Amino acid sequence: MPCRMSRRILRGRGWIPQARFAAPATSAGFTAVELVLVIVIVGILGAVAGPRFFSNSVFQERGYFNELTSAVRYAQKVAVASGCRVRVNLTAQTYELHQQAIAGGGHCDTADSSFPLPVLLADGQAVSGTAPSDTTLTPPLSFTYDALGRTNLAADQAISVGSWSLVIEAESGLVVTP
């Protein structure tokens, strides 16, 4: 059996086991020029193509559409629950919900046509909203829901919010979305 000491060589300060495999003569890696070039290309792509992929205007438009749809449905529910008519005012950039005034005895003032009371959410905030930039609502419209949930519209009404649309059925007041 060969001596263990014969497999070791003296290097520097002590005995170190002899390497079985030699290290390659060349090292693999990237040069600084290659790394800088890749960083510059990624930066240019990020500046030019990034905003096209990460634009949130479509999401904001869809969010406003959902918000408006919920508000119109809420107007119908409030009219049925309270027995007071609710007016929905839609402009190109905003929406608002208002209710008839309350007369004596907690009943609605049917003679009131000014709708002075804003419809409130459970947290006390008035139901209203503003469209995000580059989003418009067409056509501007004002209609009311009665105590039975019907509208005063003469015919079904299509409303567009950007590329999204909803239909309010005149007789039933139902809000239909795609």
Image (tube, rainbow, N blue to C red):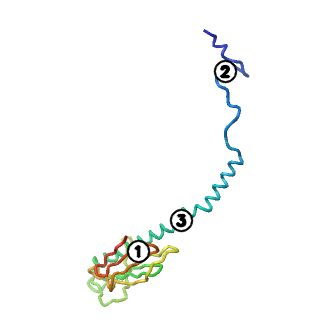
Element class at badge 2: loop
| Residue that label 3 marks | 55
- Would you say 45 lies left or right of 116 here? right
Mark seen at residue 18? 2
Frontmost residue, 13 versus 125: 13
Against 114, residue 44 (above or below) is above
- Would you say 52 lies left or right of 88 here? right
Element class at badge 3: loop
| Residue that label 1 marks | 165
Mark found first going from the N terminus, 3 or 1 = 3
In this rendering, which labeled residue sits more in front, label 3 or label 1? Answer: 1
Horizontal and vertical percent position of residue 5: 66, 13
State the CA–CA distance, disc 1 to disc 2: 79 Å
Mark seen at residue 51? none
State the CA–CA distance, disc 3 to disc 2: 61 Å
Q: Quarter-wise, where is residue 125 in the image?
A: bottom left
Horizontal and vertical percent position of residue 49: 59, 61
Horizontal and vertical percent position of residue 51: 57, 63
Q: How many callouts does the rendering have?
A: 3
**Residue at the image position 34 percent from the left and 75 percent from the top:** 175
Q: Looking at the figure, which quarter contains the C terminus? A: bottom left
Against 36, residue 6 (above or below) is above
